[in-house]
Amino acid sequence: MSLAKVDWNRAYHHPKLGSLRAGDLLAAWAAHDALHLRQIAKRMHELASHDAPGFDAAYAGEWRA
């Protein structure tokens, strides 16, 4: 079956969240992965500043939420 033929509105009733459509689940999955990428980027920024003792990484810019 191709993705074009998937019924993205097909729903499952979750006991706590209520109606959850296939498209909702796919969108949440992608957004969740993006949040992990943001966490990784933040940690890399922190480590780059920490692992350069005696040097100033301020030129790179500040991390903003």
Image: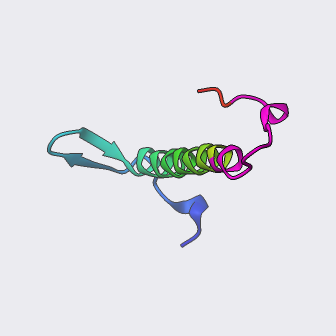
The x, y position of residue 1, in whole percent, is 53, 73
Q: Which residue reaches farthest front?
A: 54
Please state the total of marks drawn on the protein image. 0
The x, y position of residue 65, in whole percent, is 58, 27
| Residue 27 within the segment the image draws in magenta | no
- Note whether 46 is above or below 5 in the view shown: above
The x, y position of residue 54, in whole percent, is 76, 44
Q: Which residues are magenta?
A: 47-62
Front residue of 60/24: it is 60
Q: Which residue reaches farthest bottom?
A: 1
- At horizontal 78% and vertical 30% (from top left) the residue drawn is 61
Q: Which residue reaches farthest left?
A: 15
Front residue of 15/58: it is 58
Front residue of 18/30: it is 30
Residue 42: image quadrant is top right
Q: How is the image coloured?
A: rainbow
- At horizontal 72% and vertical 47% (from top left) the residue drawn is 53
Position of residue 5 in the picture relative to residue 25 (left or right): right
- At horizontal 64% and vertical 50% (from top left) the residue drawn is 47
Front residue of 50/19: it is 50
Position of residue 15 in the picture relative to residue 9 (left or right): left
The x, y position of residue 9, in whole percent, is 42, 46
